[in-house]
Structure formats: C-alpha cells, structure tokens
Amino acid sequence: MQAGNAQIGRTILAALTAAVLVMSMVFLLANPANATHVDPEPVGGNANCSTLTGLVELTRFDPVPDGETTQDGVTIDVYDDGTVFDWSSTVDIEAVFVKGGAGGGGNLYIYDPAETSDTGLHALTNNQGQLAELSHITFCVPDPATTTTTAPTTTTTAPTTTTTAPTTTTTVPEETTTTVPDEVRALVFVTVEGECVVDDGKGEGEITVTVSVDDAATIVLRDGDGDVVATVTADTVVTVPEDDTYTWEATPNEGFEFATDFVSSDEVEIETCTPDEVKDLEVLPFTGAETEALAVIAAVLSAIGLLVILATRRVEE
C-alpha cells in the first residue's frame, strides 16, 4: 500500500514539474526581450518621425538588409533571422521606429536623453506570437530646419594725440535665419509585400501596399498578363488569385519625391497555398474504359425504359 502511494506521489510531482516547464516556455515566447536602454511603445499604422514625435528623419533602412550595414552615420547589425537588431550612431538619436510584417503598426523607441547606441530592438509580434521580420527602420533626430546666428559687436577707438582722432563704430548686422528647403520634407516611401493565405479551405493571395504619407504616391498593380489589378494611393490590402507573379510601379504625386536609392517598381510572387486535400477533389477526365462502361449502362437504362412503356400500353389495351 505504501509503495503504491509513493508511486502516485512521484507521478503527481512529475506532472507538476512538466506543467511548470511548459508555462515557463509559453511566457518566454510571448514576452520577447526588449531593447537594452528603453522599452518600446506599440503604435498603429505606418507613421513617420514627424507624426510620432515631432522629430525629423535622419535616415531610413528600407528594405532592412541582413548583417551589418552603415548609412548616414548610423550602423545596424541584424540577426535572429531578420527579426532583431543592434544600432550605433555618430550623432545623438532621440527616437527609432521599427516596422515589421505585412500589417500596419510597429514599435517606437524613445530615448530621453538621446543615445548613440542600443541593442535588442525588434518589431511587433505576428499572429503566431513570433517576432515579425523587419521591413523598415527609421532613425529620428531634432529638427535642424531653423538656425539663428548673431554677429558680435566691435567698437574701435583711435589713440589720442594732440589732435583727437575720430571714433569708428562697427554696426552689428541684423539676425539672419536659414531655412531648409521644403523639398527635404517631401520624401515618400512605398513598400509592397505579398503572401498566400487560406480562407474557407481555399488559398488566395494578399498584397499589402504601404505608403508613408497618404496620397503622396500612386501605385499601379498588374497581374502576370499585364492587366491592372488595382491602383492605390494609401495603405491597402489587395486580394488576388494565388499562383501568379504580380508587378507594381510607384509614381510620386505632385509635391513629393522618392529617395535617390528607392526602387520604384518590382515583382511580387504569390505562390499556391490551397491544401492538397482540396486539390484532390478536382474532377479528373474519364479513361477510355470508363467511357465505354458508361455507354453500356446508358444503353441498358434506355432498354428498360422502353420495356416499361410497352408493358404500360398492353395493360391499358
């Protein structure tokens, strides 16, 4: 009896230990590590430095490359299958916006005071609870648009002799203001991403178009035959058939322009994702033997019908 109770106790202890391990793993997967210096603030939509913080954009990595890359004095090092990155900068950074995945929204990291490096930054988690793959990273700094400079005042008096020399006064010029041209603020970015999803047992393509500023650019989407599928000017998800390659071309609208390294046209491939069991239900063509068998059955049914008609007439007579 005591041996049986001991066995039951060991079984309960093992079950509790396993449950604790499973709960620990779920907690770790649902709570990815944050940045070393600050915690991120989730934000919706495809925002920019100005709308999020009132700052201006120093540089933007779009698309995000693997490994280490440097531009405009900012270096990023991307790892963990393109979901996490570290950064360093030669100038103070006050905010970093991280976008990932096909949907809208991202993580905003605000540094107060400003920082020149951080580690472990990432985008939001996807529907499966995993970190989304990075799509673009924006670094924000204070607005340098207006600079005020005041010249010093200098007064010079000539030395005194038997004759007093005239006094010379230098007048200070008025304050001058230098303004950055409006074109610097008119840059627009466009991203186009596609995937195949299963809806009601059948696969279909979803192409997600993201525009940094609404109505700043026009994007034309065409299918593999060259026919126009959609024309959009803001964030849009377009449903298309699976198993096709689509092309897109973006044109900036009046008052806007693309960055010099921006790719304004590309292809989006939508693969087939319809489950195999659905494909197996498709009607297959009959073989020659099956066709002959159907013809014999039809002939027998016709003969039976004729006999029934003759029998009915005899009964009526």
Image (cartoon, helix red, strand yellow):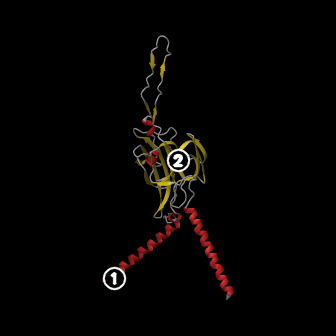
Q: Amino acid at mark 2?
A: Pro
Q: Of all residues shown, which one is farthest toward the right?
A: 3
- In this rendering, the answer to whether 115 lies above or below 172 is below
Residue 192, percent across and down? 48, 49
- In this rendering, the answer to whether 28 lies above or below 60 is below
Quadrant where the image shows the N terminus: bottom right
- In this rendering, the answer to whether 156 lies above or below 113 is above
Q: Earlier in the sequence, mark 1 or mark 2?
A: 2
Residue 11 visible, this angle: yes
Q: Nearer the viewer, mark 1 or mark 2?
A: 2
Residue under circle 1?
A: 314
- Looking at the rendered structure, which numbered label has been put on residue 113? 2
Q: Residues within 10 Å of mark 2 (few under 14, many from 20)?
A: few
**Pick the front one: 51 or 26:** 51
Quadrant where the image shows the C terminus: bottom left
Q: Amino acid at mark 1?
A: Arg
**Pick the front one: 59 or 54:** 54
Residue at disc 1, secondary structure: helix
Residue at disc 2, secondary structure: strand
Q: Residues within 10 Å of mark 1 (few under 14, many from 20)?
A: few
Q: Quadrant of residue 181?
A: top left
Asked if labels 2 and 1 touch by Cβ distance under 8 angstroms, the answer is: no
